[in-house]
Image: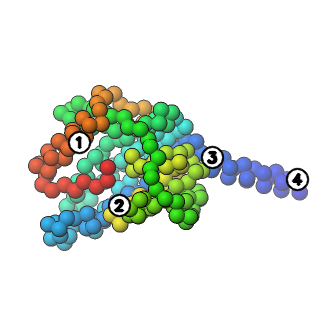
């Protein structure tokens, strides 16, 4: 009986430790509905494009810092849809409550830091489990996005920088773009948590450079769809 009690206690402690994980790597699958993002003058392209495309992202975190990055995949055959910014990284400083976005222009790297403000969204009362974590559903003000948030992981973990909650977002549902956490690894690439050296600029300057790059890509590669932030 004593051995059974100890075994049960160890099992409970193991579950508690898993659900109080303070560092790790969340693996997200990002699905984009290409057809739904085509404009009225682009409908003829449906026959040439797959309906959806999927990318993998990692959110690496500890108690103080985080890094969200794209995981390169093998190039599929056929036509490619280029998504601006999908090769960039976003760094998070949970201590100072800011996140850092970077942009490269003429081989020079710039960054801006933005406050991690809590998003305005309504709690629906719906719940579900993702990766064995209890998640609550929040709806965006326009009702177009569902965010599934758990408070069993460090707050303000988000696969969509600029959208933060008092908890970790493990899924985002929308008809054109979605994210879902598919695994949680214990490994942490510590070197990824340190931002690379870059020159700091204002948010307004960053947006101007982002717009310049978008126009440059359009002129070089034809029509480029911008999805997300």
Callout 2–callout 1 Cβ contact below 8 Å: no
Q: How far apart are marks 4 and 3 (CA)?
A: 27 Å
Q: Distance between the residues labelled 4 and 2?
A: 52 Å
Question: Residue 192: percent from the left, percent from the top?
Answer: 42, 36
Q: Which residue is drawn at 67% across and 52% down?
A: 15
Rate crowding at label 1 as few (under 14), some (14 to 19) or many (20 or more) other CA atoms within 10 Å: some
Residue 177 is tagged as 2
Residue toward you, 189 or 144: 144
Residue 2 is tagged as 4
Number of the front mark, 4 or 2: 2
In the image, residue 71 above or below residue 63 = below
Q: Which of marks 4 and 3 is nearer the N terminus?
A: 4
Q: Is residue 221 left or right of residue 150?
A: left
Q: In this view, does 149 lie to the left or right of 20?
A: left
Number of the front mark, 4 or 1: 1
Q: Which quarter of the rendered picture does the N terminus lie within? A: bottom right
Question: Residue 54: percent from the left, percent from the top?
Answer: 34, 60
Callout 4–callout 2 Cβ contact below 8 Å: no
Residue 20 is tagged as 3
Residue 183 seen in the figure: no
Task: Tell me the residue that label 1 is attached to.
Answer: 210
Q: Earlier in the sequence, mark 2 or mark 1?
A: 2
Residue toward you, 40 or 89: 40
Residue 141 seen in the figure: yes
């Amino acid at each position: 009986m004593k051995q059974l009690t100890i075994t049960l206690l160890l099992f409970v402690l193991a579950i508690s430790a898993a659900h109080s994980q303070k560092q790790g790597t969340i693996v997200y699958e990002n699905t984009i509905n290409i057809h739904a993002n085509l404009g009225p003058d682009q409908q003829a392209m449906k026959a040439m494009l797959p309906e959806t495309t999927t990318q993998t992202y990692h959110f690496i975190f500890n108690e103080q810092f985080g890094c969200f990055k794209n995981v390169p995949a093998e190039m599929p055959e056929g036509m490619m849809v280029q998504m601006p910014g999908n090769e960039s990284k976003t760094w998070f400083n949970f201590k100072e409550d800011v996140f850092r976005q970077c942009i490269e222009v003429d081989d020079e790297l710039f960054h801006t830091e933005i406050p991690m403000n809590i998003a305005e969204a309504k709690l629906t009362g719906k719940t579900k489990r993702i990766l064995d974590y209890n998640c609550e559903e929040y709806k965006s003000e326009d009702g177009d996005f569902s965010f599934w948030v758990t408070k069993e992981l460090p707050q303000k973990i988000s696969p969509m920088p600029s959208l933060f909650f008092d908890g970790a977002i493990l899924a985002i549902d929308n008809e054109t773009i979605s994210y879902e956490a598919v695994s949680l690894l214990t490994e942490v690439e510590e070197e990824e948590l340190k931002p690379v050296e870059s020159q700091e600029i204002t948010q307004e300057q960053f947006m101007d450079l982002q717009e310049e790059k978008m126009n440059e890509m359009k002129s070089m590669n034809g029509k480029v769809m911008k999805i997300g932030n």
